[in-house]
């Protein structure tokens, strides 16, 4: 076999493995959609707490079944991807319902509930899916968040050994309180669509033009002409 043929064979095998990896990634179809992350920082040691709510889509049911055999790790991270808190549940800390209808993990100060739910809004009956929709909630008490104050945006990660890690970052964050500092993060606003230019036509008309400079607003009346274009 010539060297060129050997190189071609290696390239073909490499491309085949890459295609297989992409196929597996696409058919797995797992997705974590966070609804909210809340943190509560207190002045006393080990008195912090945080919670999360999310929606999980797992068509292969691998996440729930994997929790029953390998356990679950939930991690909270800050804007720099530094770990604020980690809760690791062994398989013995979790109870999986029949037919992968959900799972419940519990240990001192930490609880996670994964329950089968209806498809989220916007997913019609014709959606090609085998199911696997879950609502996820987690509560973690008597912890010491590894940052004071907590720096946001915040990220939550769910890791199932042998299955993978699902995560999402929430950017719409707000802060309340002083003695007990509460940070609430939700999905950030989506980019507003660009408005199409407005075209005025016709004989002389009167319009109101508004000019904004900082906090000030100026209004004036002006005459317009045919095909005046306002951006």
Image (cartoon, rainbow, N blue to C red):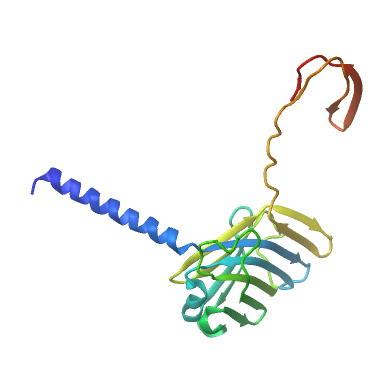
Q: In which quarter of the image is the C terminus?
A: top right
Q: Where is residue 197 in the image (x, y as percent from the top left)?
A: 72, 27
Q: In which quarter of the image is residue 203?
A: top right
Query: What residue lies at 70% left-to-right and 41% top-to-bottom?
Result: 192
Front-most of residues 230 and 20: 230
> x and y percent of residue 93 in the render?
56, 83
Identify the residue shown where x is 21% and y is 51%: 10
Residue closest to the far front = 202
Q: Report if residue 66 is visible in the image.
A: yes
Left or right: residue 80 compared with residue 225: left
- Residue 210: x and y, percent? 86, 26
Q: Look at the image and tell me whether residue 149 can be seen.
A: no
Examine the rendered structure and indicate whether residue 120 appears above or below residue 208.
Answer: below
Report x, y in % for residue 222: 89, 17
**Residue 163 placement: quadrant:** bottom left
* Number of numbered tags placed on the structure image: 0
Q: In this view, does 94 lie to the left or right of 22?
A: right
Place residue 86 in its image quadrant: bottom right
Residue at the image point whose x is 58% and y is 78% from the top: 102
Say left or right for 149 vs 124: right
């Amino acid at each position: 076999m010539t060297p060129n043929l050997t190189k071609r064979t290696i390239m073909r095998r490499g491309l085949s493995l890459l295609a297989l990896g992409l196929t597996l990634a696409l058919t797995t179809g797992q997705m974590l959609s966070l609804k909210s992350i809340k943190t509560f920082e207190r002045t006393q040691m080990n008195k912090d707490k945080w919670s999360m709510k999310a929606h999980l889509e797992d068509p292969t049911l691998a996440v729930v079944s994997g929790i029953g055999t390998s356990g679950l790790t939930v991690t909270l991270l800050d804007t720099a991807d530094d770990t604020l808190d980690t809760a690791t549940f062994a398989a013995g800390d979790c109870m999986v319902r029949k037919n992968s209808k959900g799972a419940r993990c519990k240990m001192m100060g930490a609880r996670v509930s994964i329950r089968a739910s209806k498809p989220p809004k916007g997913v019609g009956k014709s959606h090609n899916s085998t199911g696997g929709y879950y609502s996820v909630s987690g509560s973690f008490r008597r912890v010491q968040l590894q940052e004071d104050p907590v720096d946001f945006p915040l990220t939550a990660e769910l890791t199932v050994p042998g299955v993978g890690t699902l995560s999402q970052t929430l950017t719409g964050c707000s802060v309340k309180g002083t003695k007990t500092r509460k940070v609430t993060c939700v999905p950030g606003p989506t980019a507003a669509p660009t408005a199409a230019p407005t075209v005025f036509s016709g004989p002389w008309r009167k319009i109101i033009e508004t000019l904004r400079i900082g906090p000030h607003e100026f209004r004036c009346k002006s005459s317009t002409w045919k095909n005046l274009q306002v951006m």
